[in-house]
Amino acid sequence: MTDRQTPLLGWREWVALPDLGIAAIKAKIDTGARSSALHAFAVETFSQGGKDKIRFKVHPQQRDTTQMTIAEADLLDRRQVRNSGGRAELRYTILTSVEIGEMRWSIELTLTDRDAMGFRMLLGRQAIRGRFWVDPGRSFLLGSHTQTPLFTDRSESKE
């Protein structure tokens, strides 16, 4: 039995990462994964105003390398994470906002090469704990990417 006040997610959902300039990205909801991950490449760290920062590129659409956004964020940490193959890798970690449906909150997001994976983003159990129930037999329960543009109006973030 589910709590009627708790929203229901499907095993995949359209999410937004507004702080990164991504209005819609298809994410796999993975309760077996502790952390969340985003496909990132051309990653570079730098310092600005005494803060460690990170700049990276994202292809937010599956199987599409023509659409791209460039994102910047404060660098939160570098952490050892076990990938789906069980191999540990050191990943950059950021804190950023995520939106699903009408809800918006902050999550920790690791950056990694997910180019060979089916989804550009993985939303792990830490990000959804206490906020949603997950129905593994359903998809896209909280909205469609056609409701908003894929990118926010940040012309420097497009190629």
Image (cartoon, rainbow, N blue to C red):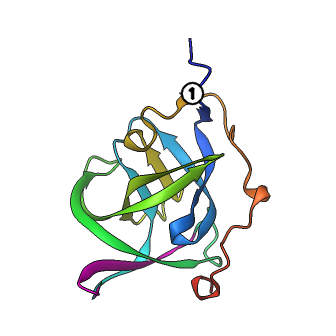
Q: Does the magenta stretch include residue 57?
A: yes
- Locate the C terminus by quadrant: bottom right
Residue shown at the point (26%, 78%) measured from the top left: 52
Q: Give the quadrant of residue 56.
A: bottom left
Q: Is residue 12 magenta?
A: no
Q: What element carries label 1?
A: loop
134 left or right of 80 in image: right
Residue shown at the point (34%, 73%) measured from the top left: 74
Q: Name the residue under label 1.
A: 6
Q: Give the quadrant of residue 76.
A: bottom left
Residue shown at the point (65%, 73%) measured from the top left: 152
**How packed is label 1: few (under 14 Cα within 10 Å), some, or many (20 or more)?**
few
Q: Examine the rendered structure and indicate whether residue 17 appears above or below residue 5.
A: below
| Residue found at the far right of this picture | 146
* Residue 145 in view in this figure: yes
Q: Is the magenta stretch mostly helix, strand or loop?
A: strand
24 left or right of 123 in image: right
> Relative to the observer, which residue lies in front, 88 or 6?
6
Q: Residue 92 location, x and y as percent? A: 29, 67
Q: Examine the rendered structure and indicate whether residue 133 appears above or below residue 27.
A: above
Q: Examine the rendered structure and indicate whether residue 71 appears above or below residue 37.
A: below
Q: Residue 153 location, x and y as percent? A: 68, 78
Residue range highlighted in magenta:
48-59
- Locate the N terminus by quadrant: top right
Residue shown at the point (57%, 52%) measured from the top left: 99
Q: Give the quadrant of residue 22.
A: bottom right
Q: Residue 116 location, x and y as percent? A: 48, 61
* Residue 61 in view in this figure: no
39 left or right of 153 in image: left
Q: Residue 64 location, x and y as percent? A: 64, 70
Task: Give the amino acid at mark 1.
Answer: Thr
